[in-house]
Amino acid sequence: MTFATLGLIDPLLRSLEKLGYQTPTPVQAQAIPAVLAGRDLMAAAQTGTGKTAGFALPLLQLLAMEGPKVSANSVRALILVPTRELAEQVHEAVRQYAENLPLRTYAVYGGVSINPQMMKLRSGVDLLVATPGRLLDLFRQNALKFNQLQTLVLDEADRMLDLGFSEELANIYKALPKKRQTLLFSATFSDDIRLLAGQMLNDPLSIEVSPRNVAANTVKQWVVTVDKKRKPELFVHLMRKGKWKQVLVFAKTRNGVDALVEKLQGLGINADGIHGDKPQATRQSALDRFKLSEVQILVATDVAARGLDIEDLPLVVNFDLPIVAEDYIHRIGRTGRAGSTGEAISLVCADEVNLLSAIEMLTRQTLKRQNEPDFEPEHRVPDTDASGQVIKKPKKPKKPKASGGGGKRNLGKWVDSGEASPPEPSVKPVRKVPVFNTGPRKRKP
Ligand code: AMP
């Protein structure tokens, strides 16, 4: 699957290419077509899944293709987020995606002067990212009108409620046009979130990216560290040593699949590959032959292997770690099914330490490492653990380390660093009270 097959227009595809996004993540694959089709969405997805692009890309496309020009002080799409850090982060992503589109985007949040924000809103904004408190202030001061609003996104809805924004949300909700598209993203689905969803969404499509911590405990998992260029050699060595009979191997890219298959075939090993560039019929035939044990080693990309029904595999090998940590769970879930035991081996090089860390954090376990004699890497893979830490052994006397307040996430693309962003100054303390009061909710006696 590609972004083009999801129906995205050329200006967006060009931005994605520039950003180096090659394949849609699971949440993007589900959300993009649904949003383009005008559906409401209720998505269980955390930071790190690629959810921002999942809603922002189709939203920008709809704004570029449909609807009137934005009027003064108006906004056509609104993304509500719990904190100003997230507002900046989401807006930055939006800005990059929208680079080739003639759209005005902006972010407003508390803790900074309201006047420049009011000025900026005067000429209207196609897409506005906002924290709830500041948005309401702007609305009450007539700096904002919602009559042109066509889409509302609630991002990290659970955090918005945890930070006590339920009242603000209720007030915003009252001010919005009834006819609109609404997308709700939340990491958890408590009763409060369901109540909120019930009130705000219309026949939503539910999306859930794979549960976070379900690595089957019947699967024995371990890591062999190795230098990147020696992976093929290590693979063949382990295969011969372990007398592997049937193995599903995951590689990161199509080229990676082809290169490994070629190498194995060159050694007389019965291997085949599947990836998105191959015609469906070829893929199917490789898969069928693998299932019939006519092919011993099947090498696949995540996208090609998704949804494949291959049961009772004894062994899965991660030749490369997946970019999306959730995919690790999908991959190893192909072995150890229905109570049978299975094995999942990951060949990990120093470049992949952040991906390893993300997987360990997601599965809440530190993967056992096993060195293979003669393959110990020259480029050491730093230690990792389930807390998401990459433990770097200092080589030189340590300088005091600046603590990571804000800024870049340090665990690679797919991980939430776990740094809690501080709330806006106006945020009230945590309130666990259910949400909206837009109609009679109490049961009648
Ligand atoms: P998010 O979950 O939206 O916070 O995204 C997490 C990170 O993944 C961000 O740094 C995005 O730029 C990046 N990202 C999102 N989608 C993709 C993709 N399809 N390919 C590569 N990187 C992506």
Image: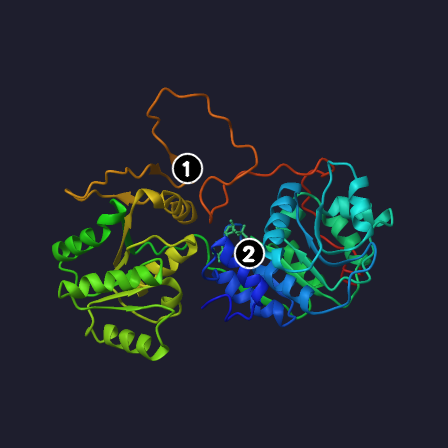
Mark 1 Cα within 10 Å, few/some/many (few <14, many 20+)?
some
At mark 2, the secondary structure is helix
Disc assigned to residue 89: none
Q: Give the position of the N terminus as an image quadrant.
A: bottom left
**What is the x, y in percent for residue 74?**
80, 57
Residue labelled 2 has its Cβ within 8 Å of some atom of ligand 1:
yes
Q: Amino acid at mark 1?
A: Gln
Query: In this rendering, would 239 be left or right of 309?
Result: left
In terms of depth relative to the viewer, which is nearer, 344 or 100?
100
Q: Which mark sits nearer the N-terminus, 2 or 1?
A: 2
The answer to which image quadrant residue 276 occupies is bottom left
SS at mark 1 in the image: loop
User: Where is the C terminus found, in terms of image quarters?
Assistant: bottom right
- Which residue in the rendered view is the most extreme toward the bottom? 281
Query: Cβ of disc 1 within 8 Å of ligand 1?
Result: no
| Residue 295 percent coordinates (x, y) | 20, 71
Residue located at (65% from left, 60% from top): 101
Colour mode of the rendering: rainbow
- The image shows residue 104 at horizontal and vertical percentages of 71, 55
**Image disc number at residue 389:** 1
- For the residue pair 423 and 144, the one nearer the viewer reads as 144
Residue 340 in view in this figure: no
Q: In whole angstroms, how far apart are the C-alphas of marks 2 and 1?
A: 23 Å
Residue type at numbered disc 2? Lys
Q: How many marks?
A: 2
Label 2 packing within 10 angstroms: few (<14), some (14-19), many (20+) = many
Residue 315 quadrant: bottom left
The residue carrying mark 2 is 51
**Which of the 4 image quarters holds residue 375?**
top left
**Residue 327 horizontal/vertical position (percent):** 40, 58
